[in-house]
Amino acid sequence: MSSSTRRRRYLRTAIGLAAVLVLSVVGAGAWFYHRLDNNITTFDSGGVATERPPAPVPASPGASVPVNVLLLGSDTRDGGNDSLGGGDEGVGHSDTAILVHIYADHKHAVGVSIPRDTLVTIPSCKLPNGTWTAPKTDQMFNSAFTVGLAENGNPACTQNTVEKLTGLRIDHTVVVDFKGAAAMSDAVGGVEACVPNDVNEYGIHLKKGLQKLSGQSAVDYLRTRHGIGDNSDIGRMKRQQAFLSSMIKKVQSQGFSLPTLLPLADAATKSLTVDEGLGTAMKLVDFARSVQDIKLSDVSFVTAPWRFAGDRVRLVQPDADTLWKLLREDRTLDGQSTIGTGQVTSSPTADPAAATAPLTPEQAATPITVVNGTGTPGVAGSGAEALKARGFQNITLGANAPGQRATRVAYDPALKAAADQVAALFPGAKVIESPGSEAITVTIGPDERTAATRIDSVTAPSPAPGVPAGAAAGSTPGATPGGIPTGIAENTRNADTDPCADLTFG
């Protein structure tokens, strides 16, 4: 046999093996996608209201838009969930409800927990027999899921209720039951969670401390509200936020590889009920890929501003409406745009005189929000004192945002003159143009020296005409333009917060 004949035979063999390998991989992938498709349960889109908030418009042709996902945790005992949750079988309530807003840049996200006992208006909802209910006021939020007493609940009714409450268009709704929570925590090898104290209530037994939870123990952690704090749902929501943060961290640490994602996808889809827009494995994969670049430090959780109303909950106004407005405008909780036309630059001015030049009355009155991005208590307050010593009057402390890598000063171009003065107090700060912002926002990162040191290093100039030296800061958070309302600031938790921090209420 000639060498050329042998080469042709080897080549044919190699091509044949490659073809078999490709067909095997494609066949396995197709089989797995088919399996996932068979796992997924969808709910009828016919139950979604016809009058809805408008869909977001791209900032420019081809640009991405924000995405709103409603995540519901059903406490149904049907379908074998009674073995994990106890109690009688039957239609469950949506005792967990998190509205996840994915910003248009697809690099930031915020999850808003809605207390289950919140009194809301439940709009007209479709019943299993095809008729529609009349709207009802002052109803418990979680009862929307039970309208019609359908076996799998009424996710469309809860979606309609959230759209009515927030003015946000919900793009996708996902329902997870006890089995789904247990299976997903198993699939990632357990989730790190912190139990504030020993729990021995209602058949739930958990030991105090930081530990890895999966299966039944994960469900118990997510369910329990008795034996911790004041036994309210508010504390439970904080723990659910911390648990979800830890799960995100675990998946990201393992990487978005097939060995990680396939078991998780198989476990999740067996216990998911989703809208038709996520009703296939390919649609779920495409959605997962669209958000895989969001870092844990760029995810926040906030509980909708609330107060007790007897044994129920009412939302605090105008704070709650401010929160919905921020999300409708695709702004962060401190009012910043994630897709502004401005670019991150170095300090806007290299002129040392900016640190000592007198402030004009307009500059002194500029609203400034100071945010602690370090996780170290007192940093924002010290920063505010530095600004007060400089002569600025209208200062508000914003919600903590630990995990920031650098100090930044964000401002609307119309406020540039005042921003120059502010940036001079924070040498090396990154400066961001944020068109539409009503206030200058200073987020102090770990790269900065302490504010006290900065005060000592700056020679305070004479105050602006009519401004007394050492003028007091503005009123309490939320009282000045551009400030974060107290109801938002006090209920915010960054996803990379210590999993043992702030886990109880009462």
Image (cartoon, helix red, strand yellow):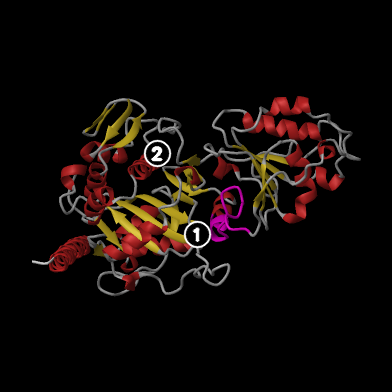
Residue that label 1 marks: 166
Q: Which mark is residue 242?
A: 2
Q: CA distance from mark 2 to mark 1?
A: 24 Å
Q: Say which label, 2 or 1, has the lower sequence index.
A: 1
Q: Quadrant of the C terminus?
A: top left
Q: Residue 219 at what x, y percent from top left? A: 26, 41
Number of other residues with Cα within 10 Å of mark 2, as a class: few under 14, some 14 to 19, many 20 or more: many
Q: Secondary structure at mark 2?
A: helix
Residue shown at 43%/50% (left/top)? 114
- In the picture provided, is 286 more to the left or to the right than 63? left
Vertically, is 210 above or below 5?
above
Vertically, is 306 above or below 471?
below
Tell me if label 2 and label 1 are in contact, CB under 8 Å. no
Where are the magenta residues, as a range? 324-340
Instruction: Determine which quarter of the picture holds residue 393.
Output: top right
Q: Quadrant of the N terminus?
A: bottom left
Comparing 501 with 29, the one in front is: 29
Asked if the magenta segment contains residue 331, the reply would be: yes
Q: Main secondary structure of the magenta part?
A: loop
Comparing 64 with 3, the one in front is: 3
Vertically, is 453 above or below 93?
above
Number of other residues with Cα within 10 Å of mark 1, as a class: few under 14, some 14 to 19, many 20 or more: some
Q: Residue 418 at what x, y percent from top left? A: 78, 46
Q: Secondary structure at mark 1?
A: helix
What kind of residue is marked 2?
Ala
